[in-house]
Image (spheres, rainbow, N blue to C red):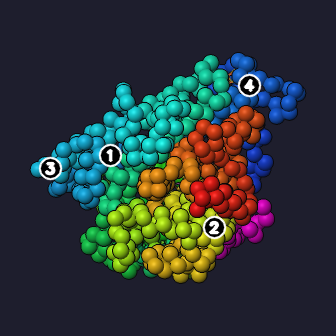
Amino acid sequence: MSEKTISLDLTTEKLYKKAKEEKIETVWDRKKIMKAPCGFGEKGICCRLCSMGPCRISPVKGKGAQKGICGATADVIVARNFARMVAGGAAAHSDHGRDIVHTLYMADKDGNYKVKDEEKLRKIANELEIQTENRDIYDVAREVAEMLLNEFGKPFGTLEFIERAPESRKKIWKELNIEPRAIDREIATIMHSTHMGCTGDAESLINMSMRTALSDGWGGSMIGTDISDVLFGTPVPRETEANLGVLKDNMVNIVLHGHEPTLSEMIVLAAEDPELVELAKSVGAEGINLVGMCCTANEVTMRHGVKIAGNFLQQELAVLTGAVEAVIVDVQCIMPSLVTLSECFHTKFITTSPKARIKGATHLEFEEENALESAKNIVREAIENYKNRQREKVFIPQEKNHATVGYSVESIKNQLTRVMNSNVDNSNPIKPLADCITSGVLRGAAGIVGCNNPKVKQDYGHIEMIKKLIANDVIVVTTGCSAQAAAKAGLMSKDARKLAGEGLRRVCELVDIPPVLHMGSCVDISRILNLVSDVSKYLNVDISKLPVVGAAPEWMSEKAVSIGTYVVSTGIDTWLGVVPPVTGSEEVVDILTNRMEDMVGAKFYIEQDPIKAAEQMLQRIEEKREKLGI
Ligand code: XCC
Ligand code: SF4
């Protein structure tokens, strides 16, 4: 990769240049020092599950070690490693979900955490057959919370929310025995089955991976999304801006980074506190400028319009602007490099969660029992740091773009209903969407999600793919760092309609939406699952038959492996732009990219060129349309 092309994003290029000039190390430098990745690790054929090893299988057939010391084959080793990635990802998402439910459990009308969307809570309660009539909403909240907390460890039955899937899907899951049971149980089962001397069959391990991944998508993540909406409000469309240009020269800049809205919601409140705003003024700033990074940004922009500073590969660059008083983080996707990096500037790097302590960071533990006070203390720390800003070191690139965000399933339906009311039939809000697809005005829909990865030119995978799809009348929904790439590139502005094909452009004008919809953070991929399920039920065809595709062009985390696996298991073909560590096993590659289709009606595609991938996606969409006769 040439140094000139680390990113599609100009702000990244500019700040990377600044880093070079000032000899400050970034992720791209460390990537270079790492040189070529370990060939065994890259292919997934290294096993260190017991101390007879570590064992590594020769990548050349018939030459060198073909089995581990215990006799495990490359197929088994690769499948076990894959399964453990899924378990790691499912654990991260689901533990996030669990924390949100704990917060619901302690919600109180006089407390810091309240029920904001009563209607959504009632709906969920009804779904769980919890009585709502004539009951205090907080009693209902506690009962719902208790029941959802049991989803993590209940001894019998399967997860409640899989009932939201169409019957045809549930049947497939049942027949394959991959209906997820309790969430923690699925993760523990994988850890057990991949222990030395347990499962020695790749297909069985991939099956277990599917069940565990489903417990993430239709369990932990879905719970996380739903209960976040209950506590903090279900997102509605709102305006925002994205990219590092949202940092302000004359304000206290606070970057909120991580994942869980329990922290970020309180920081948003704290930053609006008049006393703290006054304090900011008293130290010479014009006020407090709160901006988001990674999925935390998605959570707070969807609900408050808080501006998006950037996605995963920009976390170091935010500090490099020299204009950030504090980076406040909770869990996941936080580079430990922020410790040394912030030491080069006045920036305070503040960790808040006991689950993600980082040596050298300032740790100010966020106490949920005392949430607002706790958040205020953290914000105060940032304000007091403003005086230490070294003006000569400040460089804020001016690039930013406008975006409309906030497309929850509810708000999409609302938007559609509004259009329909001017028409005759207003029976089902899904109808206009389904009609657009069946009539061919929209050829299909694509979910583009996932991370940045220094193996890929930043945002290039996301943006090229999205542009190609919308130009061909495929509506795109996004989450995670992909959504932020789209927002930064201006694809979430209603103006971006001009890049869409004729049909999609008409739909965007009629419904008043951008061609790329921001559906939230990575746990909010559960929103996409709910939306496709609604369309599948309305049209009475299984999800695998719909002209719907998914992709993670720049994925890097275990969470993305879990996501990809549950999306495929839900019946949606998924393209990966970064090769997963499975190529050391022909069998595992064959299962993932071929045999899974016979099992769940969808499979993985691995294609590093985003434009080629988009072409394949379009072709697949047309194939599905043809089979449906639409
Ligand atoms: Fe992390 Fe969620 Fe990936 Fe972005 S997309 S790098 S996982 S922040 Ni989730
Ligand atoms: Fe080697 Fe088998 Fe132990 Fe893995 S489990 S390290 S393959 S002996």
Disc 1 vs disc 2: which is toward the camera? 2
Q: Which of pointers 1 and 3 lies earlier in the amino acid sequence?
A: 1
Q: Looking at the rendering, which quadrant does residue 608 occupy? A: bottom right
Disc 4, SS: loop
Give the camera-side residue of 440 and 374. 440
Where ligand 1 lies, by image quadrant?
Answer: bottom right
Q: Name the residue under label 4.
A: 73
**How far, Cα to Cα, is label 2 from label 3?**
46 Å
Residue visible at 65% across and 22% down? 200
Does 16 appear in magenta?
Answer: yes
Q: Residue 330 carries which label?
A: none
Alpha carbons under labels 4 and 3: distance apart: 58 Å
**Of the pair 291 and 341, the residue shown nearer to us:** 291
**Marks 2,4: beta carbons within 8 A:** no
**Among numbered discs 2 and 3, the one appearing first in the sequence:** 3
Answer above or below: position of 243 versus 69.
Answer: below
| Front: mark 4 or 3 | 3
Residue 424 position in % (x across, y down): 35, 74
Amino acid at dot 2: Leu
Cα separation, mark 1 vs mark 3, equals 22 Å
Q: Residue 64: give x, y in percent of width and height.
A: 86, 26
Mark 2 / mark 4, whichever is N-terminal: 4
Magenta span covers which residues? Answer: 1-22
Mark sitting on residue 101: 1
Q: Residue 133 carries which label?
A: 3
Q: Which amino acid does label 3 sit on?
A: Glu
Left or right, 96 with reference to 607: left
Number of numbered discs overlaid on the protein picture: 4
The residue where tag 2 is placed is: 469
- Element assignment for label 3: loop
- Label 4 C-beta lies within 8 Å of the nearest ligand 2 atom: no
Nearest to viewer (mark 2 / mark 4):
2
